Amino acid sequence: MRRNFHNSQRQDASALNLGNEWNEGWKNCVFDIVWKAYDRLKAYYKSKNVEPKDEIEDDITFALLRNADIVKNFYPANFRKVKIYNQPPDKSKERNRKRNTNDIGVFFGDEIEKSEFIFESKKISTLTVNGIGSYKEDLDAYLEEYYGSHLAESSLIAYLHKGTTVEFFALVEKVIKRKLKQFSLFPSRPHKTSEHKKTVANAKNPKFLCHHLIFEMQ
């Protein structure tokens, strides 16, 4: 069932039937918040005559987080259970990769030690295999459980500074060797998914669903 909460649909939280545990409904609400935060960020850049392509990756992420916090305030009070923070990578899994700070962690309830979902973002300036190498590396990090064995689903965000969404998705399919499927909750958004198997032995959650979101920043 589609859960895209526009102004006319903001209602008492009890009517949403989301429950007190992290579930599919809560996850879909977070996607709604993040997409609306992106819309606000693009509107802000336009109003200030800011060229998004000139913004550095970390600044875009921090601005997105600020807007997500604003958007969340329009939701019912029950959404206080959801907390969206910037967090460093989980260093419990050592890995030869750049230590960046572009992980957006989604925490639920009183659980502050373990994220329920992660949005990992990357600035994409060149539509080539090498140009999206860091994007592929972050997908591999999920599959190698660099971000935690409890995650069976999370997301990659591409800050697209060049090319089209169609071109980017086609390149991703070529690089990850998987078909991407449109995420049905947001049929008009550049939001697709891919199914994977984790590469670590005896994984707690051997299957992994990756969401691919494109935020056009041109």
Image (tube, rainbow, N blue to C red):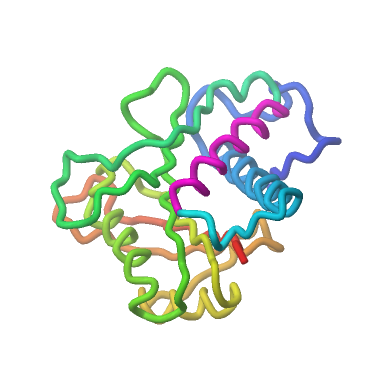
The answer to if 62 sits in the magenta stretch is yes
Relative image position of residue 139 (x, y in whole percent): 34, 60
Magenta-highlighted residues: 57-75
Where 39 falls versus 30 (above or below)?
below
Where 183 falls versus 117 (above or below)?
below
> Exactly how many numbered labels are in the figure?
0
Where 124 falls versus 119 (above or below)?
below
Relative image position of residue 196 (x, y in whole percent): 35, 64
Main secondary structure of the magenta stretch: helix
- Name the residue nearer the viewer: 119 or 51: 51
Relative image position of residue 135 (x, y in whole percent): 37, 64
Q: Residue at x 49, y 26 (%)?
A: 21
50 sits to left or right of 206? right
Q: Residue at x 73, y 54 (%)?
A: 46
Q: Residue at x 37, y 23 (%)?
A: 112
* Residue that lies at the very extreme toward the right in this rendered image: 8
